[in-house]
Amino acid sequence: MTAATETEPGDETEPGRLRDLIEGARVVLWDFDGPICRLFAGHSAERVANDLASWLEGRGLHGLLSEAERDLLDPHVVLRAVDRRHPGSDLVAELEERLTQEELKATASAMPTPYADPLIRTWTAVGARLAVTTNNSPRVAREYLASRGLVRCFAPHLYGRTQRLDHLKPDPHCIHRALNATGAAPATALMIGDTPSDLFAARAAGVPFLGYARNDHKRKLLRDAGAAVVVESLEPVLRTVGGRRQA
């Protein structure tokens, strides 16, 4: 399969281009937070980042974060910053576990991405193999998918954050794990993601990419990063996959 070429803004949902991506996909690799659900819809990621920073400060480690890193209010920024300064340390392991626990709490109020559940079931029904490739904990992905009755569509292919934080996307490590485990060639897979880091990881692994953008800001970030095909809803994807089932 040939990955889609660059399009002009506003042309990215053209049915033929989307169909080409979908028809070539034997294995579909899903980012978790975004394409499958909004993990922190009811459990503020900003508060989690602040709590992690406060925990570091309580241990006398305020200096591990720059002002810019604190101001971003992103839990993964906090985690990566500490790992850069103390890679592979017990401190990083403890901080990663604290983030995982917060993510697990967030699953209770996570908001399903519109059309994601039926798309996952339909893609499974037409014979595609699915995997999660995420920077969140795979324990979190499993917990959420179990709550939606979707684990069977993915298991055992749930690949996510470990204590090797240098393996987080945009590094393609989790994508390579999924490809190796499913025996898929990169050109026969498709990555669905909502951030430039998803795009860069897919590109590094040689996997075609479908961008999902729930708002104009995310769409612009993906377009500026070079994403060729971006959808603002999974509905046309579901319609295309469902059409394959009926064919």
Image (cartoon, rainbow, N blue to C red):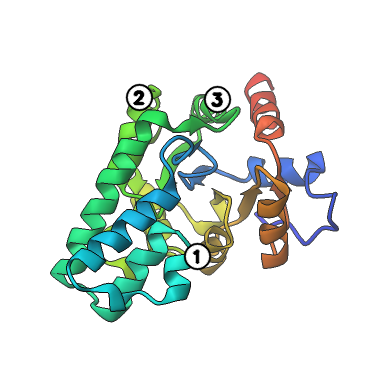
How would you rate the neighbour count of disc 1 (Cα within 10 Å): few for under 14, some for 14-19, many for 20 or more? some
Secondary structure beneath dot 3 equals helix
Give the residue type at disc 3. Thr
Q: How far apart are marks 1 and 2 (CA)?
A: 31 Å
Residue 205 - label: 1
Q: Which badge, 1 or 2, comes first in the chain's sequence?
A: 2
Q: Residue 244 carries which label?
A: none
Of 186 and 43, nearer the camera is: 43
Q: Do the residues labelled 1 and 2 touch (CB within 8 Å)?
A: no
Q: Quadrant of the C terminus?
A: top right
User: What x and y, as percent, mark residue 193?
Assistant: 56, 50
Quadrant assignment, res 156: top left
Whichever of labels 3 and 1 marks the residue nearer the N terminus, that label is 3
- Residue type highlighted by circle 2: Ser
N-term-proximal mark, 2 vs 3: 3
Q: What element carries label 2?
A: helix
- The residue located at (31%, 54%) in the rendering is 51
Residue marked by disc 2: 147
Residue at x 48%, y 74% (from the top left corner) = 68
Q: How many numbered discs sit on the rendered protein?
A: 3
Label 3 and label 1: CA atoms lie apart by 26 Å
108, above or below 159, in the image: above
Identify residue for label 3: 122
